[in-house]
Amino acid sequence: MKLGGIVPALVTPYDGEGKVNYEMLKKLVEVLLEDGADGFYVTGSTGECFLLSEEERIKITATVAESVNGRVPIVTHVGMIGAAQAAKLAKEAERAGATAVSSVPPFYYNFKLEELVRYYTAISDATTLPVMVYNIPRYSGVIINADNLGEIKKSCRVEGIKYTDSNLYELERIRTRYPEMTVMFGQDESFLYSLPVGVNGAIGSTYNFMLKKFKRIWNAYHEGRLEEAEKIQHEACRIIDALLQVRDITAVKYLLGRKGIVCGDCRSPFSPITEAQKQLLDGIGDLD
């Protein structure tokens, strides 16, 4: 997989009627490309994937692909509970212009390892694109580790992992056991501390509005300016502290609105942002 660097997990903008605002999505993509985005992760957790219809998920991929026009990779999240539905989305994502597909493991029913393998095999059989496992146990309830990832890799074409968990020891085990895999980190608040493990890059929600800050961390670390990298990470964490008092996706959308990219509220049953939350976010200060 030719994926690396700082990759925003795109929000899904809505208009005043709660419909996907594809024109605002194009604007967001262009702004982030100008700021140095190294790729895009679409219709994932930040994009409210499970609150979108299948048709919306594919049209979002097509819209981003049209705007990107081959400049950077596009990873489409196709996660569902059902293997057949996820495989169908993967096939359609390839037609829509994705350069890789990704999926959370099937959740809710406490699936066994052999069933996880069956699920990812269905996805990889449906497309010629690289497949990326999305490990986010906080939401999925399923932990992908070095051991079960190896079992999945034996049976299907998995070339990468989006690792959204605080267990850096397990991240190191995955990195060293599978050096050929593309490993993207998914926790913005501890981004800097994943870099010594040797990740290829990171995919995150806050990169929608402070991409430049994380690009500076990335560059400072790789150029040996570690104190500078740590200082910027601390700045990012103080901003994330405020976000978590609201809700990360809700806050990201509001902060994008301050930059002229109006994304609307998240879809119900998410609560609309309150005036008190807006005041909290307005006090954050410099986002770059």
Image (spheres, rainbow, N blue to C red):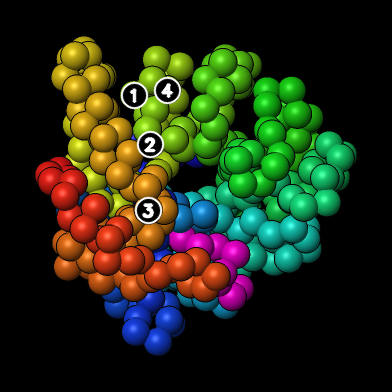
Secondary-structure class at tag 4: helix
Mark 3 vs mark 2, CA separation in Å: 16 Å
**Marks 4,3: beta carbons within 8 A:** no
Residue 53, horizontal then vertical, whole percent? 59, 75
Q: Mark 1 points at which residue?
A: 192
Residue found at x 61% / y 46% = 139
x%, y% of residue 105?
70, 46
Q: Residues within 10 Å of mark 2 (few under 14, many from 20)?
A: many
Q: Specify which label sits upstream in the sequence, 3 or 1.
A: 1
Local SS, label 3:
loop
Provide the residue span drawn in magenta: 47-54
Q: Quick one: label 1, few (<14), some, or many (20+) residues within 10 Å?
A: many
| Disc 1 and disc 4 in contact, CB within 8 angstroms | yes
Give me the C-alpha separation between circle 1 and circle 4.
Answer: 5 Å
Residue 46 sits above or below residue 271 on the image: above
Camera-side residue of 260 and 23? 260
> How many numbered discs sit on the rendered protein?
4
- Using the numbered discs, state the Cα–Cα distance from disc 3 to disc 1 in whole angstroms: 24 Å
Residue 146's spot in the image, x, y percent? Answer: 68, 23
Residue 277: give x, y in percent of width and height: 30, 58
